Each structure stands twice: as C-alpha cells, then as structure tokens.
Image (tube, rainbow, N blue to C red):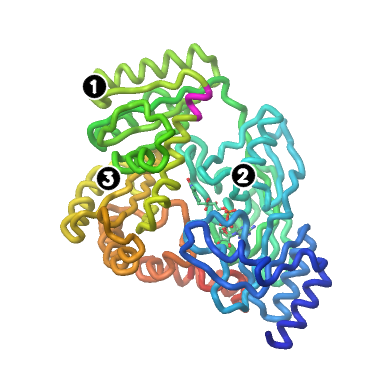
Amino acid sequence: MSSSNNDFLQALRQLLGPAQVRVGADAAAFERDWRKRYTGRALAVARPGSTAEVAALLRLCAAHQVAVVPQGGNTGLVGGSTPDDSGTQLLLSLARLNRVREIDAANLTMTVEAGCVLQAVQEAAAAQGLLFPLSLAAEGSCTIGGNLATNAGGTQVLCYGNTRELCLGLEVVTAAGEVWNGLSGLRKNNTGYDLRNLFVGSEGTLGVITAATLKLYPQPLARMTALAACDSLEAAVGLLSLAQARAGSGLTGFEVMNAFSLSLVRRHFPQLVQPLPPSPWTVLLELSDSESEAHARALFEGLLEAALEQGLIADAAVAESLEQSHALWHLRESIPLAQSEEGLNIKHDIALPVSRIPAFVTHTDAALQAAFPGVRLVDFGHLGDGNLHYNVQAPEGQDPALFLREREAAVNALVFDAVQAHGGSISAEHGIGRLKREELARRGDATALDLMRAIKKALDPQGLLNPGRVL
Ligand code: FAD
C-alpha cells in the first residue's frame, strides 16, 4: 500500500473510529455482488453513522483523490455497488444511516435515512396505519438509498409509480463534501431545476443520498389476489386491459410468468404449492380496494368471470386469505432465486409498450431458437407496466457459465436490437451500472449522452463518484 493510501486510511480511522473502517477479510462480504458476477477489492469499507460523517468522508476522498463506491443493501443487479479490482476504491456503506427521522401522517410523508432497509420503511409506515407502496423481492435487504439511486420499480408501479414518483425530497452529499438539504414534503415546488430528479436514478455517480422524504398512502381496506392461466401473451394483455377497465387504479399488481420460469420454481423449490396446472403463461393479479372486503370480492370475481367468458383465461385460483395471497406472491418472487439455483443466465431487464410485448416475444423467441438452438427462456415480469425480465438460460445440460461467457455478446445484440425495433428500453428498472455501460454508449441518444457527461463533469469534476458506472 502506498504511503498516501496509508495517510488516507489513518485519517479515515480518525474520522469514523477504527471499528467503522474495515479492510482485508472483514471487507470481503461487501466486495461481491448479489449475482456473484463481480468480485472486486476495496481499499477499505467505510461505515459512517451520520450525514455529517458522510460529508467529512467525501471531503477527505476529494482531498486524497480516492474514488468512492456507495453501497446500500448490495442487491443491485448491474454491478454498480461493488468496487473494481484495483484495490484503490473506497466502499462507502450507508448501512448505519438507518433511522426513521419523521412520519407526518397528516401530510402523508415520512423522512428516512438512506440505509433504512425497504421492509423496515414499509413496516414503519404500516405501524401508523399507512402504506409505503414500493415492493420488490429484495425488500428484506435493499435500502431506500439504493432504491432511489436505481429508481427501483417493483410490483406496484402500475398503480403508484417507480421510486422516483414516491420521492418528494432528498438530502444529498456532493462530491465536494457539501450537504444539499432538499428534504421537503411539498407536492408542489417549482423553484428552478429539479435536482431531486437528477439524483434519483443516478446510481451513485452524481452524489451520495443520505436521506429522503417519501410519499405515503392510506392502507387499502381489502386486497384480492389470484393466479390466472392464459394460453397466450395476447390473452394476458387482453386480461390486463379488462382489469384496468374494471378496476382502474385499484389494480395494484399484474405480473406474468412463462411456463419455464414456474417450472424452475417447481424444480428448485418443490415445497411451494402451485395451485394451477402448468400453462403457457400465468398471470398474478392483485386488486386493492378502499371500500370493503365484499366490494373487492364482487369486483374481482366479476372480472375473472368476464375473463373466462371472453376466453382470456382458462382457469384461475383466488387466494382466500392473506396467507394464501402471500403464498402466491412468494411463487412469483421465487423465480429470481430459482434461476440463480439453475446457474448463471443472460439477463435482460427491458421495457416495451405493453401493446408490443406479444409481438416482441414471438419474434425474439423464434430468432433466439434459430441462432442458439435449445436455449431456454426465463420470461417473467411486471406486465402491467411493460417490464419484462427476458432472461436467456443455456440449453439443458450445457455449462451455464461457459454459455454466458461465449454467447452473451451475440445474445445481447439480438435481444437489444429487437427491443429497439419494438420501441423499448434496454434497462427498465435495474439501471446501467457496469453491466450495460457499453450498451448505453452504443445505443443511447448522442445528445442525451453528451448532456449526461456534462452533468457528471459539473457535479463530480474529479470523477470520484462510482467511476466506470453508467457513463
Ligand atoms: P445497492 O445494490 O447497494 O446499490 C445499487 C446502486 O445504487 C449502486 O450503483 C450503488 O452505488 C448505488 N447506491 C446505493 N445506495 C446509494 C446511496 N445512498 N446514494 C447514492 N448511490 C447509492 N429492482 C427493481 O427495480 N425491481 C424489482 O422488482 C427487483 N427485484 C429484485 C429481486 C431480487 C431477488 C434481487 C436480488 C434484486 C432485485 N432488484 C429489483 C434489484 C435491486 O434490489 C434494486 O436495484 C435495489 O433498488 C437496490 O438497492 P440496494 O440498497 O441493494 O442498492
């Protein structure tokens, strides 16, 4: 280690206390991403406990020209939250900034620190009889800072929007170590450029989010959940239109799963009951109601009957209790884990206009089979907001790691060309990180990329915040 690194670490220990600076084996858990695709080596892991400590730490990094990789729950899927292997980047863990600062029930807002785990935020809201509606399978570990930095989506976007729509204000530490206090519970505030929306989705490359003011909602009085079997994706899209027409904003979940993704759940988690026999597509739909249980049930059952009559669904299983509803969601949420048990695959988190999804899938499935015979498609996602996880698994019996290494570039080119031809986006909710940086440079709008580079230069002139990610 160079003497300047030694000076830096000594100053860091003085700032945070020795226990909050980890090196060597103590840093290992922070250095590898959730998918086990990226393993790096950090100069150290720093665990500040307050916004003031984060600011002092960034001033120290600026003075020593040390690059910083912010990390929340480390559940990100694009390689944004772990250091490279140079051993020179400081990993900044926000985990100790985990206080709920305020809940303002009358204003329907809460202010929380960036390291709060999403589930803890949901629970704090629920304890006041309120709802924080962001929900995703990683909610037991991901943090609100990470959710904001990636503009996470999840399962209720069709009703409540992405994390961006759930955020009213931010507190951010800049690359120079200054604190911007933009915490505000205002729903109207047109006072110049929207800095909040600049930092949301910036993946740690423009500033470190230390706290946020979030929108809350009344808890619905009743929820109805069901699985429905569809013979085709066209039928699933038809069911979505019918559900939106009948339930309006009461439709809070509409997920789709192809037969192969549920077969992986059956193979790796045989203990999970699947109430419907296998069908080409299975939809998980949920309706939330603020009137009454009886009203919700009548609406839901009427919807499913109409869908059966119109031939949109072949069968349905309605959850009769909260427990059964959780079990249905658990099936859907087990797909990412089941596919990681099956081995590495080539992931595509894509967005398309809902109306174009059936044509996209028909065309791209056929093109992939022609180019890579036997590939298996783990195709599932948030159909209600046009977001598919269109993941390509090696043919049965082939080494998944080898397939990934040898075929990833060609598979990506085929899939992303099709996404662009159908008017879609190469990243719906996971972000760019390291995984899609070159793809963004290749496919992004040239003017947009120039503007992004100019913003990055203005906010982080030394290029110390999460270098090598996004741009
Ligand atoms: P991390 O992984 O720690 O970091 C993610 C990025 O944000 C990195 O670039 C990091 O540098 C930056 N960052 C983290 N904290 C801060 C901060 N305080 N300030 C500035 N930058 C910061 N995502 C979805 O959108 N929808 C889903 O449905 C979904 N499902 C998932 C299911 C599973 C099983 C898993 C493992 C992941 C899933 N994800 C999903 C991806 C992931 O959970 C989200 O991206 C989440 O928002 C990341 O939060 P985190 O705290 O783990 O962030």
For the record, the magenta segment spans 322-326
Q: Amino acid at mark 1?
A: Gln
Q: Nearer the viewer, residue 263 or 280?
A: 263
Asked whether 36 falls inside the magenta stretch, the response is no
Is 43 situated above or below 192? below
Task: Identify which amino acid the numbered label 3 is placed on.
Answer: Arg
Q: CA distance from mark 1 to mark 2?
A: 39 Å
Q: Is residue 255 left or right of residue 92?
A: left
On the image, which quarter does residue 314 sit in?
Answer: top left
Ligand 1 has an atom within 8 Å of the beta carbon of the residue at disc 3: no
Q: Marks 2 and 3: in contact by CB < 8 Å?
A: no
Seen as rendered, the residue at the extreme bottom is: 3
Q: What residue is shown at x 71% (from left), y 29% (from top)?
A: 128
In depth, the one of 375 and 444 nearer the eye is 375
Asked whether mark 2 lies closer than 8 Å to ligand 1, one says: yes
> Can you identify the residue that label 3 sits on?
356
Residue at the (59%, 76%) spot, across then down: 463
Kindly report which numbered mark, 3 or 1, lies closer to the viewer in this rendering: 1
Q: CA distance from mark 3 to mark 2?
A: 32 Å
Name the residue that disc number 1 marks.
310
Towards the viewer: 67 or 267 = 267
Dot 2 alpha-carbon crowd within 10 angstroms: few under 14, some 14 to 19, many 20 or more: many
Choose the circle earlier in sequence order: 1 or 2: 2
Residue name at image x 62 percent, y 78 percent: 88
Residue 137 horizontal side relative to residue 398, left or right: right
Find disc 2 in the rendering and name its residue.
Answer: 118
Tell me: residue 155, above or below residue 206. Answer: above
Of the residues tagged 3 and 2, which is closer to the observer? 2
Q: Secondary structure at mark 2?
A: helix
The picture places residue 315, in percent across and down from the top left corner, at 29, 23
Front one among 454 and 385: 385
Compare marks 3 and 2 and give the one earlier in the sequence.
2
